[in-house]
Amino acid sequence: MLKNDLFLRALNGEALSRPPVWMMRQAGRYLPDFMKLKAKYDFFTRCRTPELATEITVMPIDQVGTDAAILFSDILVVPQAMDITVEMKDGIGPWLPNPIRNSKDVENVVVPDVEDRLHYVMEAVKQTKLALDDRVPLIGFAGSPWTILCYAVQGQGSKNFDLAKGFCFSQPEAAHQLLQKITDTTIAYLKAKVRAGVDAVQLFDSWGGMLGEVDYQTFSWQYMQQIIDALKEETKVIAFAKGCWFALPNMARSGAHALGVDWTCSARNARYLSGGQITLQGNFDPSRLLSPIPEIEKMAKNMVDAFGTQHYIANLGHGILPNIPVDHAKAFVNAIKSYNA
Amino acid sequence: MLKNDLFLRALNGEALSRPPVWMMRQAGRYLPDFMKLKAKYDFFTRCRTPELATEITVMPIDQVGTDAAILFSDILVVPQAMDITVEMKDGIGPWLPNPIRNSKDVENVVVPDVEDRLHYVMEAVKQTKLALDDRVPLIGFAGSPWTILCYAVQGQGSKNFDLAKGFCFSQPEAAHQLLQKITDTTIAYLKAKVRAGVDAVQLFDSWGGMLGEVDYQTFSWQYMQQIIDALKEETKVIAFAKGCWFALPNMARSGAHALGVDWTCSARNARYLSGGQITLQGNFDPSRLLSPIPEIEKMAKNMVDAFGTQHYIANLGHGILPNIPVDHAKAFVNAIKSYNA
């Protein structure tokens, strides 16, 4: 039995005295102990070594005190397992030397046996569950098919993912074939993670906000929906689509247990657009953790006032930034934990 | 008298048989003749030489047939005139070697005599008006104070402008001092452009969507409002804030004559959020110009169906991309011009 199950109870829509809190990318570069491991081991070594992934995942539970752990990994381990080469370059970020640009490239992409190719993730889940010792639940995650396509086609991060969008709009058949392959892999991957022990999963559609409403439905949401349909009976599912306020009405009807919201969608707009019933998660502006601590505390309290304590999981609106002082992150987490206290 | 005044009549809210159409960045890199000039003259030479700016501005009127011209220039000529060094680096874009990071840096920023420091812009306006020979109206533009602060502090383009936001959130007094200096300069600059002959002005808040609703009001919109207040009696003002759907209700009450909308905000949402009366401008996804021509034509028609022919200016939702075939741009423009025909 979990000692702190606030997070899962919020996903169940149970009545709570205060909202649970965690932070996207909480196992990340703002933590000095993470930076020590980063200096010793390269990015994918950290992902592929269960002992390292476990140590990193547990770090923010010990050091910041969040109500949930999220497995240290990367959305790009999925395309890697599909025989798309992914490197991590200093100062650039993800780098895919052989981007996908046509239907022949798509044909070369495999739908792998995830238990084999991503065995190291399942092993990390098992070790992390042991290390957590039932203190808090463990979240597994995957990128959305659209967001993975963005990297697979563009070949790197981008302000507008113009090549990825151009691929979808000029070669839609190839794009849908690729999206379906990613979807099938992701479903198998998340099911394997659930079997390995995660308590919930989150889908990250980091680049959904590049698309208009109709194109979002066509190139992103229909695949997110397939994943939710396949997972929702087996575990709790959170769908987070950055910049996709316009999709909240659809998302609220999807069967997902909670929806992530970024800071450009106010609590009031998010509750209105999502119909007022579903659990929402978010939406503190990560840059606002650079404010002085008293201001962080005040704004965190205002956020809970606005979302309400029920059907709500406090979080940032996107990943925590590397330059956030740990004390500021703690002040945010503690402000939520002492709400109503 | 203008031979084609559709654009100005849409800004006046007059009844029209079809909407006017122009494209943000229409005087840009998708035009082969522009690329020839780009090969011969560097970026700021093109901005600072009235003959070149005139030739580039008139190019899309001759070659694509839009209903308005927009003066070739850059939002960063304003910080340049304020003694902030701005360079344009190949493959990087804007590069500011001495970014603003504290109140001392802000104190060194001057509010210049724009007629002196930006004389070349006024000269380009005059020459362009002559070259246009009253065929279509001429739009002048400026970046929003927030968007200029983003570059001035970050020092270059960015996915999240974390340094710019960090500056605002940790040193708000210095930020507001800088924003006011940019605002004062921009008001003088746009008034000078109106005196020189532009028929309307557009404010570009390209990075407004980095901010949440409250921070947007504090760090961007209040300065946009000052500029609108100062200009609205002298000329027509269009306010375009990318990613700022949440601000449309406020923007609609600002006195601006039209509001720009990006493609993530559907016509229906934009009409609803802006109250249904004000002229809207937008919002074709620039990447959608990579679709096959028949699809562009169909989607352009659908866009006018959705916005309606009245109180509407057809445009893209952001600047045209360099890799758009000219034929595709023409197909978009012609689809609007033949609407109802």
Image: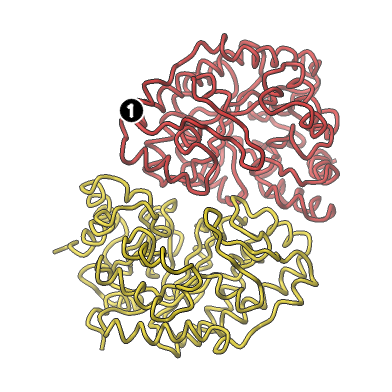
Chain colours: A yellow, B red
- Quadrant in which the N terminus of chain B appears: top right
B122, B241: nearer the viewer = B122
Q: Where B249 sits versus B44, above or below?
A: below
Q: Where A174 sits versus B75, above or below?
A: below
A242, B226: nearer the viewer = A242
- Give the total of numbered labels: 1
Q: Is residue B340 visible?
A: no
Q: Is residue B329 visible?
A: yes
Q: Where B110 sits versus A63, above or below?
A: above
Q: Which residue is mark 1?
A: B103
10 Å neighbourhood of mark 1: few (<14), some, or many (≥20)?
Answer: some
Residue B284 rendering spot, x and y as whole percentages: 69, 47
B57, B314: nearer the viewer = B57
Q: Chain of mark 1?
A: B
Question: Which residue ends up furthest to the left in the rendered image?
Answer: A341
Residue A291 rendering spot, x and y as whole percentages: 29, 45
Residue drawn at (69%, 35%), measured in percent from left and top? B25
Residue drawn at (50%, 35%), measured in percent from left and top? B151
Residue B325 rendering spot, x and y as whole percentages: 82, 46
Left-right relation of B296 to A314: right
B254, A219: nearer the viewer = A219
